[in-house]
Amino acid sequence: MRGRALAIGLVSVVAAAGPSCSATGDPASGAGGAAAGGGAAGAGATGSGGLGAAGGSGWGGDAALPPPTGARLLGTVWSPHADGKAPLFPIAGALVAAFVDPPSALPTEVACDACVEIPTGIPWTTSAADGTFHLDVQPGATFWLTVQKGQFRRVRQYTAPSTTGEVAVEPELTSLPNHSDVALGDAIPRIALVYGDYDHIEDVFAKVGLGSEDGAYGHAWGTEAGHFDVFDNSGPGEPKHGEPLVNLLGNPARMAEYQVILFACSYNANFAFMNNAGTQQALRDWVWQGGKLYVSDYAMPVVEMPWHDFVWFTNPLSSGCNENAFPPTCNHGPPFDSKATIPDQPTSDWLSAMGQLSGLVVKENWNTIGELFEGVVGQDPGGATLKQKPKVWVQGPWSYPKEDLESFGQDPATWDLSEHPLTVTWPYNCGRVLYTTYHTVGGTLGGRHPGLIAQERILFHLLMELTVCPEIPVVR
């Protein structure tokens, strides 16, 4: 029998091809399966190794469970976190599986990823919106407990209790790692952060253990080693961090070392390198081969110039702007905060489970998206061109303060307060592109506040979603 292909992870764990994988990371229906190490099959579509009552998101929260069919593992999948500190948020839609053999190593450079294959007879499930899961395995069985979302994975050998009943799994076993350690069983993607003068994404990374905090809720420079690499895109006279950006963008072989590249907001003039056709092609090639690109706010030329078909950028305060050119007049201000909604239901459920959905406001929007259009994302198996519109993850109104509207000659009483895209993604063959109109950290000076605000949690959630295997046919 064939295994089931999951869009939760990246690498095949059996040779046989399974069904197509989805964009969301949720399998289509229950898989059944035998308990680890052999034994009787699980109890139908919602039994051990199958899916939860929600049809693909596992059991969690207050959902009633049937009696255990073996040793029932109960736990929560948690985000990466700083060593010695408690996790900050749960992970929804993560694979939890009991493999007889350790899964194959994940890619360590840009690659056209395959979906995880679940061999017949392997117990597995996916975590619910609140990160919780249950998994029934054979009592006394020893197996490789695997927790994975995209290219973040933790694998540990585990021996189940010898009796039927429930057992709590330690959070350390079900927390995703903050760095790669192949010998231990931990993997995260190779990440390059293009540092800018604004939107200090490194501050978010520090809080989830990709580096360390500096005592003032910011990133302590130098502690990123072993977690992510930094390339500098700051303005003249600003502090420099990491390597010169030309070391990355001027070297396709160097770009290929990374699976994720994040471009943080910076001054308009700092993106003059995007006026180079060779740089535009290098970015397209890297994403086509499997790279995941995260771009915020004034870094807009990084997505607009190589992929100008997908997003119509505008400046509603000044009746339009000059797109697909440099300097990009579509980078504008003043900023506004937007009462946001989440069109993607699993993401909405996840935020709701953390108490972060009601009253959600995304802060520090500087740019504005007028409309989305279809663009070329790849080819079908016959070689015909495939087109898609970007997916909207976060949307909201252009809620400029009254005094800002009046300063541009706009009437607040007639101002358009309909919802517009704020965060979007689209596939491009094996890779993905993400653009967000707002500063990820919700402020101009960085994410220097205790804990994580909602939009910073969304950053890490979408970072994992970006690394989920492709949902369209790919050209390898």
Image (cartoon, rainbow, N blue to C red):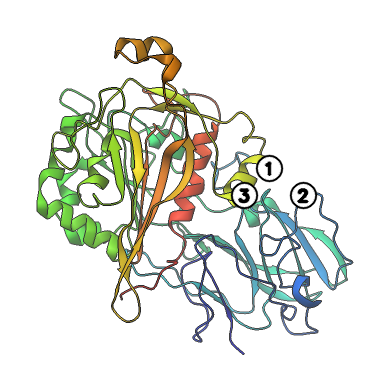
Marking on residue 353: 1
Q: Is residue 123 left or right of residue 114?
A: right
Pick whichever, 88 or 303, lies toward us.
Answer: 303
Q: Residue at x 45, y 47 (%)?
A: 392
Q: CA distance from mark 2 to mark 1?
A: 9 Å
Identified by mark 2, the residue type is Gly
Percent position of residue 8, x then y: 53, 64
Q: Earlier in the sequence, mark 2 or mark 1?
A: 2
Q: Nearer the viewer, residue 313 or 473?
A: 313
Disc 3 and disc 2 in contact, CB within 8 angstroms: no
Q: Which mark is residue 61?
A: 2
Residue at the disc numbered 3: 78
The local crowd at label 1, few if under 14, some if 14 to 19, many if 20 or more residues have their Cα within 10 Å, is some
Placement of 242 over or under 73, stated as above or below: above
Q: Amino acid at mark 3?
A: Trp
Which quadrant would the C terminus be assigned to in this image? bottom left
Q: Earlier in the sequence, mark 3 or mark 2?
A: 2
**In this rendering, is residue 466 above or below 136?**
above
CB within 8 Å, label 2 to label 1: yes
Question: Quick one: SS at disc 1?
Answer: helix
- Nearer to the camera, 67 or 336: 336
Residue 201 appearing in the image:
yes
Q: Is residue 230 left or right of residue 207?
A: left
Question: In the figure, is residue 420 to the left or right of 130?
Answer: left
x, y percentage for residue 25? 55, 62
As helix, strand or loop, the secondary structure at mark 3 comes to loop
Give the numbered dot on residue 163. none
